[in-house]
Amino acid sequence: MKTKIFLLLPLLLSIPVSPSFAELDLDQEVLIIPDTHNEKPYIWHVLKSPKDFELVMDYPGATAGKDTAYTFGINRKQGEDISDMHVFITDDDLHAYKHVRPEAAGENYKFVYNAPWAGKYRFEIVFKTPKGWVNLRKDIRIKGERRKEDSEGKEIDEGYGIKVKLIPEKIYSEHVGTVLYEISYQGKPLKELEKIDGLDMQAAAWDEDLKEFIYAIPRQNLGGPEVAVSFVFMRPGKHAIFAEFKHNGKLRKIDMVVDVLEELRVDPNSIENIKPSE
């Protein structure tokens, strides 16, 4: 079952509604939020660290506060094609975030990253194969004297406003949870989002123990101002969600923490389910 929201009222007021118009045109202006129990299409099916793939990464002199060149290769079975390569980076307590599209360099890939502070960082290497998504990961300890408290200030983009709504208000593990972003610019709804790989937004999420990582994208890309990204978290607990959108030629980040609850498993023989005998 789907729930339709955000019907554009000015459109309805200015154009007479006929049955053919309602069938053909309204769905183009409606943001659809998935039912919370319709989880299968929103699970990110991915192989995590499969034995057929090996990540080899080189990062000489990685130091916080300095541009560092990273080079990596994927050892794999002959003939196993890979595409759509992403690198997602965070630190061990989920304050830093970076999403990189590395450049191909022969059989390898390369990118530059400037870690904001010293410490341990998680690198999630994500790519597609003919059989589906693969996720390889590596933890790297980056040296340096730059401390987090010196670098933790967030960049503020003047003129942008973000409202975030969770649907449902309480997110449960193993069920669909949707993050609805409403983006404004200079006090007006932003309807001119620039596409990122053909998408209005890209998002990544980790749980607080860095055991669960999810890459998610919106299923509808209407150009704003509302963007809906749905997740199925398999682990309860706190999850950090980082989303990116693009406007005026610049990528802009939205970060938040969601508390994912565990659904109570009620024993059918528990006392609350035992009815008095008649």
Image (tube, grey):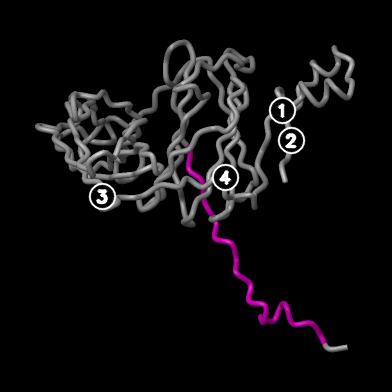
The alpha-carbon separation of the residues under discs 1 and 2 comes to 6 Å
Depth check, mark 2 against mark 3: the one in front is: 3
Q: Which residue is mark 2?
A: 4
Task: Residue 272: say if magenta.
Answer: yes
Which residue is identified by label 3? 52
What residue is drawn where x is 83% and y is 89%?
277
Q: Quadrant of residue 156?
A: top left
Q: Which residues are magenta?
A: 256-276
Q: Dot 1: what SS?
A: loop
Q: In the displayed image of the protein, which residue is found farthest to the left?
A: 61
Foreground: 192 or 83?
A: 83
Mark nearer the viewer, 3 or 4 = 3
Q: Residue at x 48, y 23 (%)?
A: 245
- What is the C-alpha distance between the residues marked 4 and 2? 17 Å
Mark earlier in primary sequence (1, 2) = 2
User: Do labels 3 and 1 touch, CB within 8 Å?
Assistant: no
Q: Earlier in the sequence, mark 4 or mark 1?
A: 1
Task: Compute the Cα span from label 3 to label 4.
Answer: 26 Å
Distance, label 2 to label 3, CA atoms, is: 43 Å
* x then y, percent, for residue 13: 86, 16
Whole-percent x, y for residue 46 in the image: 41, 47
Query: Is 74 displayed left or right of 160 in the figure?
Result: left
Within the magenta stretch, is there residue 236? Answer: no
Which numbered dot is residue 41? 4
Specify which label sits upstream in the sequence, 4 or 2: 2
Disc 2 residue type? Lys
